[in-house]
Amino acid sequence: MNVLVIGAGAREHAIAWKLRQSAKVSDLFVAPGNAGIAQVAETLPLAIPKPHAPDAEVAAFCSAVVAMARERRADLVAVASDDPLGLGLVDALKAAGITAFGPTKAAARIEASKAFAKEIMERNAIPMSVAARFDDFEQARRYVESRDSDVVVKADGLAAGKGAIVTDSHEQAIEALRSLMVERSLGASGRVVVIEDKLKGREVSAHAFTDGKSVAHMPFSCDHKAIFDGGAGPNTGGMGVYSSPSWLDASTADAIRRDVTEAVVRGLAAEGSPFAGVIFPGLFVTSDGPRVIEFNARFGDPEAEALLPRLQSDLLEIMLACANGTLDAIDVRWQDGASIAVMLASGGYPGTYETGKPISGLEDVDSDVTVFHAGTRIEDRRFVTNGGRVLAVTTTAPTFAEARERVYRNVERIGFGGMHYRRDIGASEAVRA
């Protein structure tokens, strides 16, 4: 079968890498892809519009992908990244008679609109933090000043993982509101905001495959969003992840699966927007139980880089089953043990950074370690940096101690100008073991 994947980062590299392992995949294409993805698939040029792009630009994009899929005779198009999902690419593909993996635009609102997600959670009694929605800066400011706790300010729309601003004072929160709503630092994505009471607890990601009826849960994982060790500094798209957390007890895990993931799948279906693809709630486990902080409509990044190496089943079969409504017929199996992904970032990220830095050491990485490319390109026949997050170095092992030792030993073999990374990914698990 011919497969086309839409996206450009380390998540898409991990997806393509896993699809390439399927005996049923013949030709594999990724648009636009990156230099690392080009090692396992044919990459195709494609400009993906930003959220809130003009209708004409979105229509031209969708038409271009449909034409690309037809030209390559794609039996499946896997829409892997959030922006194309929010723009309705899956709807356009289905309308053209092309099998697509991923939720429709209506279902993808669970990620594309924080306010919509809160409404769905309220209607389906899904546990979450206290939250309110605002489209007026002064009203939002007064609400912040009325709260007894610190808050998190979230842009309502898609923001590449940078739309949630965790604040430590009302002054910081008001400054974040001004940046989003008045100065429009994130464009139209911050025109409407959601303000949540700040939760205390441990954060966990809960991924699952679903066809809109059946749900196949993935192992839990823990992302490290802050740029520096110990959770210091501003949030990023993710600096590393480990799976599965031993601190998450079985009863809490069952509650998340039942009362969050399965509940939202039922809720979306009941409202006429069945969700097919990967549903990914992010939660805090508090003293009062799990509380949802966000829903995502696709694999997380870097979560995909740590989860997919543990998948023992055929990813193509799972994707087709999700698209065709037959997921209950698939045995989705996962490798036991631990996995860790460490993200190598450009100097200055998540702020201003330079690209074009030559990358060394990739040929020295051990065979039991996989390097997924997030932001790279080829220049003068060598890999150079082409993004804020550059590489995700990943391994699996029976224990976290072994996984950490192996992944960081290999991280030290890789280098580029300004490279920085967190050194504490999975550290608490290794100590606990």
Image: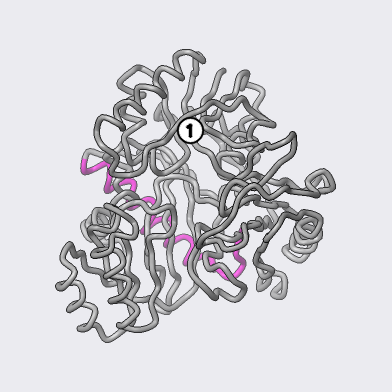
Going by the numbered disc 1, the residue's amino acid type is Ile
Residue 79 versus residue 95 in the image, above or below: below
Magenta includes 372? no
Which residue sits at x=67%, y=70%? 424
Q: Which of 136 and 147 lies nearest the eye of the viewer? A: 136
Q: Which residue is mark 1?
A: 6
- When asked about the image quadrant of residue 83, the answer is top left
Q: How is the image coloured?
A: one colour
Which residue is more in the foreground, 96 or 50?
Answer: 50
Give left or right: position of 430 versus 210. Answer: right
Who's the residue at 21% across and 68% down the image? 132
Q: Quadrant of the C terminus?
A: bottom right
Residue 80 place in picture, x, y as percent:
47, 38
Q: Nearer the viewer, residue 361 or 325?
A: 361
By secondary structure, the bulk of the magenta-drawn segment is best described as helix
Q: Is residue 210 left or right of residue 364?
A: left
Q: Is residue 258 magenta?
A: yes
Report the span colored magenta. 243-271
SS state under label 1: strand
